Image (tube, helix red, strand yellow):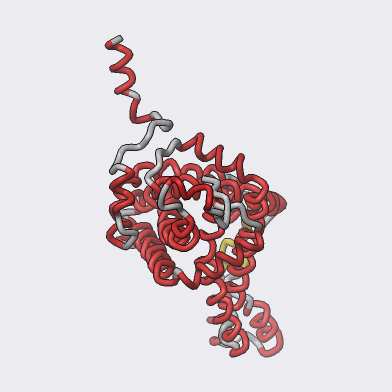
Amino acid sequence: MEEQVKKKKKFKLFDTQREGKGIKKEDVLKLKPNLRGFFTYLRRDFSRLITVNLFLLFGNFPLIFAILAFSGVGNVSYSAPNDALLSTLQGVAANEGMSAATASLFNIAGLHVTLHAPTVTTYVLYALSALVIFTFGFVSVGTTYIIRNMLMGEPVFMFSDFKYAIKRNWKQGLVMGILDVLFLFFLFADFIILFTNSADAFAGLFLGVIVVLLILYLFMRPYLYLQLITFDLKIFKIFKNALIFAILGFKRNIMAFLGAILLFVIAIFMIFGLYGILIPVGLALTVLFLPAMLGYMSVYAAYFKIKEIMIDPHVPQEKNELDDIKPIAVDRG
């Protein structure tokens, strides 16, 4: 018996189904959902965010194929002149002779460099990475459900809660994930295209519009998945409400947005700054925490605004009022 107790204590760290320790639910309900409260919540939930991060990384495994393609796996290498000016200089030398100036330019432009060209393998990797359109919604639903329950002070059982949320909301989760990926892809693609052509006044105007739309949609995203797992609403209604919440919760949304920028700056500094001394630490923190931290901040910003407007006004004050209440939506939590 004593040996079983010792083994249980020994492997307690790896028991992902046990209820996480922290402050009591009664104490959670007393916390104000402001910036100071955020760090209290984060201190309690920080260790569990590693598991959330693993769901985000491995659940969206098709992105690994995109990383491989971007890193040059499957590309073919070849040597070519450093500058396209070489062919022009060759024509000048053939017609006018090789002057000293032409010879100098000829030598500079004629230097060969190693270039890389995509192959069929590269395009296959990109095609496989597109499968993320089918996994993104499921993973977002599962992780949002877990983070929401953390903030509510509910017991969290990582794997079972993740599976439960996906099983209960898989139809809307699939549709929402497809729409989410498409919106993000086209908004970011438009931003990159217009940014590279922003010298044109017309393109600069559209770039400003795209930036506003992109930020607005990033504000909307956490409200989309929170409504999906909490209420029985149609997709169109969820998007409509999310747009309203993105405006009503502007202060909270902008704080989460600035926090995300700060995290990216810290990660970039640790990876590329200080002559590469902190590269291992920066990569480890980025892989283990960054996606989950971004999700945690966005859900923290969004959940309490939804609670204030859509949940609290419809919670009965006394038990005997329950039969007279007709909530605006069904709580799925």
Q: Where is residue 140 in the image (x, y as percent from the top left)?
A: 54, 50
Q: Where is residue 309 in the image (x, y as percent from the top left)?
A: 47, 63
Identified at 60% across, 78% down, the residue is: 194
Q: Is residue 256 visible?
A: yes
Which of 314 and 45 lies nearest the eye of the viewer? 314
Residue 299, quarter of picture = bottom left
Please say if 104 is above or below 287: below
User: Left or right of 41: which side holds 111?
Assistant: right
So how many labels did they put on this image? 0
Q: Where is residue 234 in the image (x, y as percent from the top left)?
A: 66, 57
User: Left or right of 248: which side holds 176?
Assistant: right
Please say if 72 is above or below 199: above
Identified at 47% across, 71% down, the residue is: 248
Q: Can residue 225 be seen in this view?
A: no
Which of 187 and 280 lies nearest the eye of the viewer? 187
Please say if 223 is above or below 74: below
Q: Where is residue 164 in the image (x, y as percent from the top left)?
A: 55, 38
Which of 191 and 122 lies nearest the eye of the viewer? 191
Please say if 6 is above or below 157: above
Quarter of the figure with the N terminus? top left
* Farthest top residue in view: 1
Residue 82, quarter of picture = bottom right
